[in-house]
Amino acid sequence: MHTMLWNRSFTLWLIGLAQSRLGAALASVALSFLVLNQTGSAGRMAQTLALSLLPTLLMPLAGTLVDRLPLKVPLIAAGLVQGVLQLTVGGLALAWGELPLWIINAAALLGGLAAAFESPAANAALPALVPEEELTRANGLLGGLGQAMTLLGTLAGGFLAANWSPAGAILLDGITFVVFSALLLWVRLPPKPPSEAESSVWADLKSGLSLMRRSPLLSMIPLLALLLNGGLAPVMAVLPKLIQTLGPGASGYGVYLALESGGMLLAGGFCAVMGQRLVLRRAMSVGFAFTALAYAGMWLAPVFPVLLGCAVGLGVGFALINVPVVALIQQLVPAGYLGRVFAVLNAVGALGMPLVLLVVSPLVDHLPLSLWFLISGVTQGLGLLGWLLVLRLERGAGEVRLAESV
């Protein structure tokens, strides 16, 4: 365990994450408009996005395997797989001009499978990189710098998609995955305890679920994430087409995503500055309120300037939810359980998105686009009520520090 925040491993992790987020932001805009330009359909784009998220159903099993392996193994392997996939898609799209949709969808599915291993491993690695008392600040720094790079990447991605080719941005994303994997070779992470490999994978998964049931927060957070991500899904599907219909096109969509990232950067920076002084549970309540209000504004006035203003509000809200919840879990859960706990949380939370995308994909081209903002606003409001219920249950049960009771 490192005793200082600014150690070599954390600095390399920060650099690697920053350039990886830059590439991912380039590709997020580019992939949307690669499919949209080829098909003209928001529904087809929703199906591609759904396929990239379906492997999250396997994340509990993936997270259990992560807890049995040195963390570098899934992190480096997942980065290389995603890098090769993006380089392949981008290279073929540049060479052929138009890429068959089945190739794009197959790459999206395989990339999602790699991400199912990478996500819990990344969340489990941070507590090994910094001291516990610095977790909130470290998460804030990672979130803030990551969103700064996302801001730059979405602006650049919109410009590249509009003025050159979406395939070029996807190629750059592939390069950043490979670079991140190379940097991880110099990151020092402690070995797993030998006892972790003695039981079966299914026994390990069961023990992780049993641990989660002992905490009201860990029991309820996956259900809230399921609700909220399900509400976000149709907005992700309709926004590119709506902004294209309004006139700004790919460049305008890049500006929207950049402002959303700017809001996340502001809130992430605030969390980093506050550090231990930040009241994590209260910050999450504010985050839910911000996002509900932003969706309401987008429904009431779905015009481009209002969308841009609401994008900032969404970014602030997302960061005030995500940074505190990750820090809370890292504080509550023992290191040997972090991979499977984060995997279960991410899998249940992400389940709503691909399912909703598959359900709404035949509808998004036929219903008013602004209607989906109303649906998202309602689900976010329900999420706020659910979070307040979690806090009430937690107060009744008393705080259980699982790291001290396993």
Image (spheres, rainbow, N blue to C red):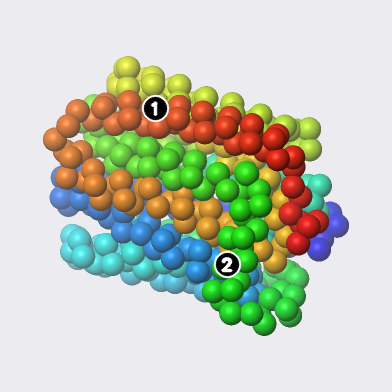
Question: Going by the image, does 129 lie left or right of 312?
Answer: right
- Specify few, some or many for label 1: CA neighbours under 10 Å numbering under 14, 14-19, or 20 or more: many
Disc 1 from disc 2: Cα separation: 35 Å
> Which element is circle 2 on?
helix
Q: In the image, residue 225 lies at what x, y percent?
A: 48, 44
Q: In the image, residue 386 lies at what x, y percent?
A: 52, 33
Q: Quadrant of residue 170?
A: bottom left
User: Which residue, as the protein is rendered here, is positioned at the far bottom?
Assistant: 198
Q: Quadrant of the N terminus?
A: bottom right
Tell me which label, 1 or 2, sits earlier in the chain.
2
| Residue marked by disc 1 | 377
Q: Residue at x 70, y 34 (%)?
A: 395
- The answer to whether 130 is drawn above or below residue 313 in the figure is below
Q: In the image, residue 74 lies at what x, y percent?
A: 56, 71
Residue 177 visible within the image: no
Q: Quadrant of residue 128?
A: bottom right
Report the mark closest to the observer, 1 or 2: 2
- Specify few, some or many for label 2: CA neighbours under 10 Å numbering under 14, 14-19, or 20 or more: some
Q: Residue at x 45, y 30 (%)?
A: 382
Question: Going by the image, does 54 lie left or right of 314?
Answer: left
Where residue 206 is drawn, which disc sits there?
Answer: 2
Q: Amino acid at mark 2?
A: Lys
Q: Quadrant of residue 388?
A: top right
Residue 229 visible within the image: yes
> Which element is circle 1 on?
helix
- The answer to whether 292 is drawn above or below residue 341 in the figure is above
27 or 264, which is in the foreground? 264
Q: Residue at x 79, y 38 (%)?
A: 276
**Image marks 1 and 2: residues in contact by CB distance under 8 Å:** no
Q: Residue at x 23, y 43 (%)?
A: 360
Q: In the image, residue 220 lies at what x, y percent?
A: 55, 44
275 or 120, which is in the foreground? 120
